[in-house]
Amino acid sequence: MSDADTELEARLEEQDSFEPPESFVEQANVSNPDIYEEFEENWPECWEAAADMLDWETEYDQTFDGSNPPFFEWFTGGELNASANCLDRHLDERGDEVAIEWVGEPTDEANRTYTYEDLHREVNEAAAALREMGVGEDDVVTMYMPMIPELPIAMLACARIGAPHSVVFAGFSADALATRMNAADSEYLITCDGYYRRGDPLDHLEKANEGLDNVEHDTETVVVERLPEDDAFDHDLRDDQRLWVDAVHAHKGAEVEPVARDAEDMLFLMYTSGTTGEPKGVKHTTGGYLSWAAWTSHAVLDIKPEDTYFCSADIGWITGHSYIVYGPLALGTTTMMYEGTPDHPERDRLWEIVEEYEATQLYTAPTAIRAFMKWGSEFPDQHDLSSLRLLGTVGEPINPRAWKWYYKHIGNEECPVVDTWWQTETGGMMVTTLPGVKEMKPGSAGPALPGIDAEIVDTTGEQVEPGRAGYLTIQKPWPGMLRTLYQNDERFVDEYWREYSDTDSDDWRDWTYFPEDGAKIDEDGYITVLGRVDDVINVSGHRLGTMEIESAIVGVEGVAEAAVVGGDHEMKGEAVYAYVITEDGYDGDEELRDAIIQGVEDGIGPIARPEQVIFTPELPKTRSGKIMRRLLEDIANGAELGDTSTLRNPDVVASIQEQVQK
Ligand code: 6R9
């Protein structure tokens, strides 16, 4: 490092707040600081600004309807179509501009560029194909696909005909697919034959078929052929399966009138992890969700039609839904899709892409930034990243060191960094700095967005002092919020509202949304999110339920009981630690350990793979018989243990501790 560099590092290290760069502010979509006050005074009408970003077929007659809490409604009476908003309305002005820039893997393969006209045509043909298969309004269509263009095409085709989609992350297991299709009564599946991971072809259809074997009702499947013939796997399609080429290309040139959907009609379902073993089917609507995705893309990501915007998430997660597909396309910009991983073929792959396509924004996850940091700045340094104007992160807390590294080595201290806190349930961003208005404080996501009313409270609901840890709550509804859990209103109330609401009240002001995150706030209203307070762990920004993992482990022959906790992990944020009691006659040996790891991969997917499996004759329990999870976490972290003498079985602690490798 040169002296100048060392000096710079030292200065950055000390600096704990950063003003937005002047050059950014001058051109920012939102730069007026009064917006916070204006939105607060003018709530809920302030959210007409979000609705106004869309084209409505029928104007709404009420902005917010809070008459039946917590089943809030937005823009009621309005009608619109999401695919028309993402495609048709851009055709006149931007028909030959690029909508999706797809960068495939392996690198020598042709990339694909879709203009708005191309995308419009393909979505229409796919919509016609789905109709012909019998997909009707409100039929849930499941998609189980990696990052290939047919995924957003299928999503928008569904939106066009009013069929909600339910996208299942391609890395999830066959079981996870079956659970989700059964839960949603979904009779249609769109999947693909296979795809590449770090250069090797994966047989995806085999996994999809295994899942279909466990779906309780009849299904129809469309299979996209992703792999070229040389790498294709040998599969005979079943009677209820057809190829995408056959289904869609039969409708060449078809035009399908976008169906007018009520603002409150479901746009999609997304299953996410919760406290119990059953994943939660988060329901998002057409008007509220889409306006939220569009407004936050405009205000926070500063997206303009001429941008080339790059979000490195997977569309199988909510980030990809809101900020690769719906938000950017609603704004008529160019959105990038990258099929591969950041380290293949080399560790500069992302920077190569940023340079080649002159990306203007990069939205990624702290886990990726930690990896970039570890690999070293020589990889980004090989490339011209000066096209970048804004950087963003999402998915988990980012520590100040990683934030500063990102700011300096990727943004060259010229790009604001937005650390965005939100959830599958919130539909879009909730807590983050407006990049053209607010100073940034590394390690803190920032203040709640204008019009969002966030408070940090204690267990009784009283606001805590600045600097003290408490629970994050959202006091007022917002358009992008989930409307319910699919076919389970009761669980919706229990999971998100019961904790801090007067559930007998029919005044919406008595209802408070609880995201199940711990947080603290500073004197300026900046919120630092500390992490989940429920049984959800966050591995590399992916939400996993400990109960789901436990049930996969207990399903393995020879396992009697299991407790799963998250332990700190340098790269992944958190890692899975599994404490396992064997059944009589079984040894906690390598064979069982492998079977457990396999069981988790089969039950959920490789992302949930335990970092360590620790065999123990007993789990530490309280006198009342509750597993002491906090203690198991401390053991996983090699932390100082408090007083364990009140346990029912204090002796077990030392033997567990010995086994944990630190
Ligand atoms: C978008 C997304 C949601 C959970 C959330 C919180 C964590 C997300 C964060 C963050 C700290 C941030 N989380 N963004 N924690 N700072 N900027 O990730 O949705 O998969 O539903 O996860 O992720 O714990 O509750 P989802």
Image (cartoon, grey):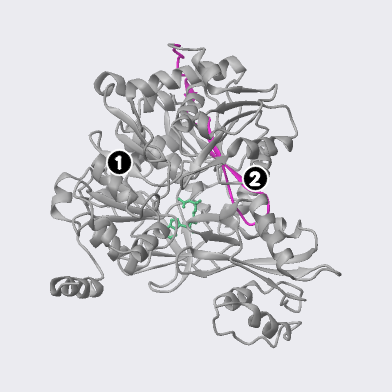
Q: Does mark 1 have its CB less than 8 Å from ligand 1?
A: no
Query: Which residue is under mark 1?
Result: 309
Residue at (53% x, 28% y) in the render: 224
- The crowd level at tag 1 (other Cα within 10 Å; few <14, some 14-19, many 20+) is many
Residue on which the image places disc 2: 176
Locate residue 196, reporting x and y percent.
49, 41
Q: Earlier in the sequence, mark 2 or mark 1?
A: 2
Query: Residue 135: image x %, image y %?
Result: 60, 21
Residue type at numbered disc 1:
Tyr
Query: Residue 313, percent across and down?
Result: 42, 47
Q: Secondary structure at mark 2?
A: helix
Quadrant assignment, res 204: top right
For the point 86% across and 70% down, the residue is 584
Residue 170 drawn at (x, y percent): 55, 42
Quadrant in which residue 297 is drawn? top left
Secondary structure of the residue carrying tag 1 is strand
Q: Which residues are magenta?
A: 254-283
